[in-house]
């Protein structure tokens, strides 16, 4: 199964028999067979025909509308998509079960961040890097013993500050400077790629959560609201460093992207059309790579996302089997 990305502007998505056709004026940009499609992501100003929308709804294929930088405006879903069965189990999770799970998620995020920095230490000598690693070691142990949501979020926030203080040390391309994380809006090209990557990954996880019948608005770590699918924000945490952050490091250090792939507007920095194409191409290649799992089997990174959503689903059905987040080695 694959995702159709419509990242170029002013495209039109139409239906021809069992095929979605993406055209920019008279140029055909992509053709995808509906039976092979999992979801459609529309970035910016492009349109989808009524016939194409109806065909996607009939085949249970969500259509996601995003800004050019990746902010999700909303999704078109089939009417039968619902969370009534599993939602009851999610609502019945006790405060202790939710706190234990939230602790595991934060620990996994901190551990994966630590592993990524340790891999960079093999080729770099940096006091900032060493200090961040020591701080992350301490915060992992503290998160394991956090007795409240507030304390846990404090450790998570401190870990993010320490991690991103050292992230810039790992960038060897002098064309890119990173002094800290800035989100809304992203302040520079590195932050633009991080924000865009997180949003793309977030939407993939949201689709998988809905496919498994989980309610994305009931979570353990993040607080849900009508506009925040908090469970998606929970499950993305363990994948930030191994998927998005590592990809951004590769894009910068191998000079796969350059200054011409970004634009400055509305007080922020964003990937432009060429930048988004480069990022999405590299993202798809990275997600198709096979990794070793605990069962000693190799599987594409796509399968890791599905595996973790299914693991969370099993936890919801049987909370005595605690949720085990994904850890990189």
Image (cartoon, grey):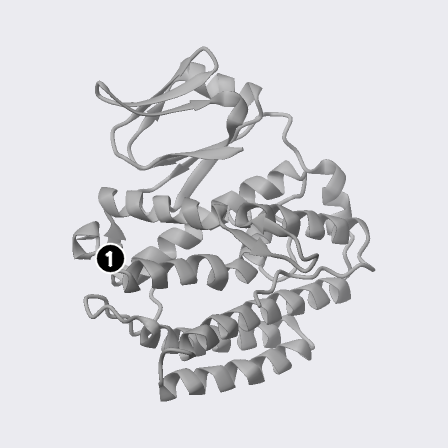
Can residue 60 be seen in the rendering of this structure? Answer: yes
Q: Which residue is at a point 69% across and 80% down the rendered structure image?
A: 145
From the top left corner, tell me how far across and down residue 64 is, in percent: 45, 35
Identify the image quadrant of residue 191: bottom left
Q: Residue furthest top?
A: 17
Instruction: Estimate how packed mark 1 is, as few (under 14), some (14 to 19) or many (20 or more) residues with alpha carbons within 10 Å.
Output: some
**Disc 1, SS:** strand
Q: Position of residue 171 (x, y in %)?
A: 30, 70
Q: Is residue 23 above or below residue 272?
A: above
Image quarter of residue 170: bottom left
Location of residue 57 with respect to 143 vertically, above or below? above
Q: Which residue is mark 1?
A: 268
Question: Which residue is at 50% across, 86% downward?
Answer: 134
Q: Residue at x 63, y 30 (%)?
A: 81
| In front of the other: 197 or 76 | 197
Q: Nearer the viewer, residue 205 or 114?
A: 114
The structure residue drawn at horizontal position 69% and vertical position 61%, both measured from the top left corner, is 324
Using the rendered view, name the quadrant where residue 30 is placed: top left
Q: Is residue 164 left or right of residue 227?
A: left
Circle count? 1
Quadrant occupied by the C terminus? bottom right
Q: Quadrant of the N terminus?
A: top right
- From this viewpoint, which residue is outermost toward the left? 260
The spot of residue 253 in percent (x, y) is 29, 64
Q: Position of residue 11 (x, y in %)?
A: 28, 27
Q: Give the answer, above or below, for where 5 lies relative to 33.
A: below
| Residue 184 visible from this viewpoint | no
Image height check: is 36 above or below 172?
above
């Amino acid at each position: 199964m694959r995702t159709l990305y419509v990242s170029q502007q002013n495209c039109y998505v139409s239906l021809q028999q069992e095929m979605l056709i993406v055209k920019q004026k008279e140029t055909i940009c992509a053709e995808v067979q509906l039976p092979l499609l999992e979801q459609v992501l529309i970035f910016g100003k492009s349109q989808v025909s009524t016939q194409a929308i109806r065909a996607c709804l009939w085949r249970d294929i969500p259509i996601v509308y995003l800004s050019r930088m990746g902010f999700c405006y909303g999704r078109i879903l089939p009417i039968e998509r619902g969370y009534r069965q599993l939602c009851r189990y999610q609502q019945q999770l006790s405060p202790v079960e939710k706190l234990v799970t939230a602790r595991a998620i934060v620990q996994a995020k901190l551990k994966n961040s630590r592993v990524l920095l340790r891999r960079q230490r093999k080729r770099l000598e940096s006091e900032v890097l060493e200090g961040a690693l020591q701080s992350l070691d301490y915060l992992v142990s503290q998160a394991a013993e956090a007795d409240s949501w507030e304390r846990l979020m404090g450790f998570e926030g401190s870990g993010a500050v320490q991690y991103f203080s050292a992230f810039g040390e790992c960038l060897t391309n002098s064309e890119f400077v990173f002094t800290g994380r800035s989100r809304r809006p992203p302040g520079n090209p590195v932050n633009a790629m991080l924000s865009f990557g997180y949003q793309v990954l977030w939407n993939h996880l949201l689709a998988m959560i809905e496919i498994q019948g989980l309610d994305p608005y009931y979570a353990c770590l993040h607080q849900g609201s009508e506009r925040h699918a908090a469970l998606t924000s929970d499950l993305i945490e363990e994948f930030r460093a191994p998927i998005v952050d590592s990809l951004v490091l590769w894009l910068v250090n191998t000079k796969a992207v350059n200054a011409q792939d970004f634009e400055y507007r509305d007080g922020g920095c964003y990937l432009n059309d060429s930048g988004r194409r480069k990022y999405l191409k590299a993202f798809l290649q990275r997600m198709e790579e096979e990794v070793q799992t605990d069962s000693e089997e190799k599987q594409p990174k796509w399968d890791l996302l599905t595996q973790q959503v299914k693991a969370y689903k099993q936890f919801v059905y049987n909370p005595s089997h605690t949720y085990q987040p994904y850890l990189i080695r």
